[in-house]
Amino acid sequence: MSFDQLQAELDQRERDALYRRRRVLDSAQGPEVQVDGKRYLAFCSNDYLGLANHPEVVRALQQGADRYGVGGGASHLVNGHGRAHHALEEALAEFTGRERVLLFSTGYMANLGAINGLLGKADAIFQDRLNHASLLDAGLLSGARFQRYLHNDVASLEQRLAKTTGRRKLVVTDGVFSMDGDLAPLPALASAARAENGWLMVDDAHGFGCIGRGGRGIADHFDLGQDEVPVLVGTLGKAFGTSGAFVAGSSALIETLIQFARTYIYTTSMPPAVACASLASLRLLEAEDWRREHLNALIARFRTGCEQLGLNLMASPTPIQPILIGEADAAMAISAGLEARGIFVGAIRPPTVPVGSARLRVTLSASHTEAQVDELLEALGQVIGAQVIGAQVTST
Ligand code: PMP
């Protein structure tokens, strides 16, 4: 069979401005990065607290490697579950205020494992239509009856909950939506789930570290405990600055996942040194409120600046600050214009976001300075003013 057909499809994708390209980073994460040999001011990392290259986190990784070596060696249930993993699970349980925590190697795997460990064909799952791809994939894979409700629309969820039967009902939402930056209305979602005897699962990949007391995430922000949010997912590759993920909840939930979550059972544990680094990062994240305070000041500064420029922001109080552009080619042109000025901001296009809502996904970090945010604003003013004002930029 020839690959010509594949190449033709790739060519079409390129013409539609939907082609995805990788960039090669030569430096550590930080406000300034080196990409393909050139230095850029970067506003596209999820390293929200600036911990990915923090000396204490790096040292913890080095010490962990000295002590435990590099590879996890085996899955957790064989002989890959080490003291470092165990200590991190216990610290995360205390941090989240949950009975227990289970580590996974990535957030994608945590979501796949949690949903498939809990649900099968006899069950029903209800997901916000803007949930992360890993949640949507997990729901499809589970074979459960699958319903998507309108974004953050509790009435739309309630309608679907009322008319769908299932042995178990699981309502699933991002805590902070990864491409919009807005928060899920958790108290109302929790009540809706409980009214139908269902469970609420929250993927707080982008909330942990950034919101809630001491960075304890969206459940803490809304003061919801284990009863209201029985399945809580966090990732370590974003504000924690390391890699991996966890599910937090009751002992029965965690034991169930140990028995049935295939992405937990059939994969090598994360390198123990990464667990050591994550523990160091957890301590910094809890202790250093100034990181969140500085980040919030940058968010306010950026939003005010964008409003003055007349840019189309979304209702986001978080470090994810997308600028809605509309068409994919316009978003790509603006991203390229910024790049020419030494600023790195990714354009997000369909199918990651709905057609007609391509955007620049600006992410801010506690490692940015006010001057760097001002530099971004100035470049945005120049590039958007020069290239697309009135033409392709949506104004609604
Ligand atoms: N959930 C959400 C909401 C995410 O944004 C992401 C990553 N972009 C993930 C899960 C996956 O996490 P990981 O990168 O650790 O696989």
Image (cartoon, rainbow, N blue to C red):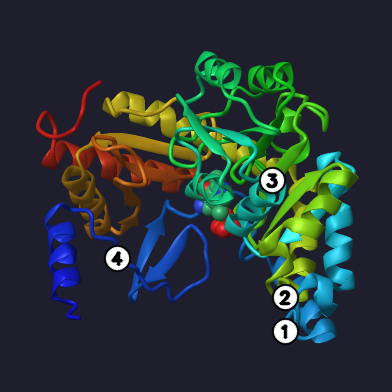
Lower position in the chain sequence, tag 1 or tag 4: 4
Q: Position of residue 133 (x, y in %)?
A: 47, 48
In the rendered structure, find residue 70 and report the number of the disc placed on it.
1
From the viewer's side, name the closer residue of 166 and 22: 166
From the viewer's side, name the closer residue of 74 and 314: 74
Would you say the beta carbon of the disc 3 residue lies within 8 angstroms of ligand 1? yes
Q: Which residue is mark 2?
A: 271
Lower position in the chain sequence, tag 3 or tag 4: 4
Which SS class for mark 2? Answer: loop
Q: Which residue is mark 3?
A: 233
User: Please, is residue 345 above or below residue 357 in the view?
Assistant: below
- Disc 3 crowd, CA 10 A, few/some/many (<14, 14-19, 20+): many
| Amino acid of disc 2 | Pro
**Left or right: 265, with 335 as reference point:** right
User: Please, is residue 39 above or below residue 385 in the view?
Assistant: below
At horizontal 61% and vertical 62% (from top left) the residue drawn is 52
Q: Which residue is mark 4?
A: 21
Q: Quadrant of the C terminus?
A: top left
Discs 2, 1 touching: Cβ within 8 Å: yes
Q: Position of residue 131 (x, y in %)?
A: 50, 39
Lower position in the chain sequence, tag 2 or tag 1: 1
User: Please, is residue 376 above or below residue 77 in the view?
Assistant: above
Q: Position of residue 114 (x, y in %)?
A: 69, 50
| Amino acid of disc 1 | Val
Task: Measure the C-alpha gap from mark 3 to mark 4.
Answer: 29 Å
- Disc 2 crowd, CA 10 A, few/some/many (<14, 14-19, 20+): many
Task: Measure the C-alpha gap from mark 2 to mark 3.
Answer: 20 Å
Task: Measure the C-alpha gap from mark 3 to mark 1.
Answer: 26 Å
| Amino acid of disc 3 | Val
Which SS class for mark 3? Answer: strand
Discs 2, 3 touching: Cβ within 8 Å: no
